[in-house]
């Protein structure tokens, strides 16, 4: 049932008539709403059900990525015109009790460190209240958010869902949690909003190319702002700003290099080494945990010629 504290004006199920796999302003709206209306979206997982609650590594390795990212929508918002801003107030998230995190074979070139993982890996999470269970008694807190949230691009034709763009899309900002408001620049009449690729949790970086991927319900209220002007998505949020949402003891590794991506790879590589040596995880398990619960931060970009990226791991997730 929809959350009791929000009157839902429209519900969009995850049936085929409400799901699309590309951004395209030519897609007919699933529903047209007024500013102030609340919509409850049922969202499939990012891989469109190809990896289920009983999924195996073989299921993940053999996924068909064409198409990927089933999006629920689009929602046409009356009065939204190019140059306006669509305000999306995220009211509630409801998961279905499970999710998965994995990485694909290195030859596919996906994720931060494909060169280090020749074969794929998978962990299917069971959710227990507000936590998800990993191996060795490790538990991570859940803070659900939509990996993909956006409106239709103004350029005609079909646009891939994988890269984010000016109008949003696959931004993977884990702070877009319940209580947040996301602002999206409108490029087409009616905005044509869609969402999907929900994550029950994610580390800043999503380094294995998956967060804690989970089918989910998303409830949101829409407004059209005609006086505000932005070029790319913005967000008001209360976090979480650490992997657990708390200021607490952390273990951190640094990556130092003259290229930010190289520094990022070093920071995660060093964290994987730490988890393997000190926490008795396999390298694959460590990579998955980094994607689900390690936050990357840019520590400095002024001490040329080298930049510093730091990876933070909360100690409290361990038993």
Image: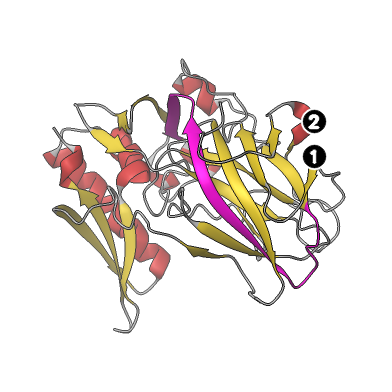
Contact check, label 1 and label 2, Cβ < 8 Å: yes
Secondary structure, mark 1, is loop
- Asked if residue 251 is positioned above or below residue 165 in the image, the reply reads above
Residue at the spot of label 2: 17
Residue positioned 69% across, 47% down in the render:
194
- Asked if residue 89 is positioned above or below residue 128 in the image, the reply reads below
Name the image colouring.
Answer: secondary structure
Residue positioned 31% across, 45% down in the render:
293
Which image quarter holds the C terminus? top left
**Separation (CA) of disc 1 from disc 2:** 7 Å
Report which quarter residue 190 is drawn in: bottom right
- The magenta span reads 77-102
Q: Closer to the camera, 5 or 124?
A: 5
Q: Closer to the camera, 255 or 299?
A: 299
Residue 15 appearing in the image:
yes
**Front tag of 1 and 2:** 1
Secondary structure, mark 2, is helix
Question: Magenta segment: does it hold 187?
Answer: no
Disc ID at residue 30: 1
Residue 104 appearing in the image:
no
Question: Magenta segment: does it hold 80?
Answer: yes
Left/right placement of residue 228 relative to residue 17 reads left
Residue 216 x, y percent position in the rendering: 54, 32
């Amino acid at each position: 049932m929809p959350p009791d504290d929000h009157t839902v004006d429209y519900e969009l199920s995850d049936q085929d008539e409400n799901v699309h796999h590309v951004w395209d302003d030519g897609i007919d709206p699933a529903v047209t709403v007024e500013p102030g209306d609340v919509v409850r979206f049922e969202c499939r997982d990012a891989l469109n059900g190809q990896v289920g609650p009983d999924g195996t590594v073989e299921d993940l390795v053999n996924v068909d990525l064409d198409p990927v990212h089933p999006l629920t929508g689009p929602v046409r918002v009356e009065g939204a015109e190019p140059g306006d801003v669509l305000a999306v107030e995220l009211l509630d998230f409801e998961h279905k009790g499970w999710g998965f995190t994995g990485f694909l074979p290195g030859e596919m070139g996906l994720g931060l460190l494909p060169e280090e993982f020749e074969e794929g890996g998978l962990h299917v999470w069971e959710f227990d209240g507000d936590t998800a269970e990993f191996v060795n008694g490790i538990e991570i807190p859940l803070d659900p958010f939509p990996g993909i949230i956006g409106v239709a691009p103004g350029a005609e034709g079909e646009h891939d869902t994988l890269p984010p763009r000016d109008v949003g899309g696959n931004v993977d900002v884990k702070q877009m949690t319940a209580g947040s408001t996301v602002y999206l620049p409108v490029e087409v009449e009616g905005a044509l909003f869609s969402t999907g690729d929900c994550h029950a949790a994610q580390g800043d970086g999503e380094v294995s190319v998956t967060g804690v991927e989970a089918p989910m319900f998303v409830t949101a209220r829409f407004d059209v702002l005609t006086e505000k002007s932005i070029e790319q998505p913005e967000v008001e949020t209360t976090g979480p700003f650490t992997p657990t949402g708390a200021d607490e003891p952390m273990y951190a590794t640094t990556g130092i290099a003259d290229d930010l991506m190289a520094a990022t790879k070093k920071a995660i590589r060093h964290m994987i080494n730490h988890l393997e040596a000190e926490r008795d995880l396999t390298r694959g398990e460590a990579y998955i945990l980094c994607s689900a619960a390690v936050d990357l931060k840019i520590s400095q970009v002024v001490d040329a010629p080298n930049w510093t990226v730091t990876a933070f791991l909360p100690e409290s997730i361990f038993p």
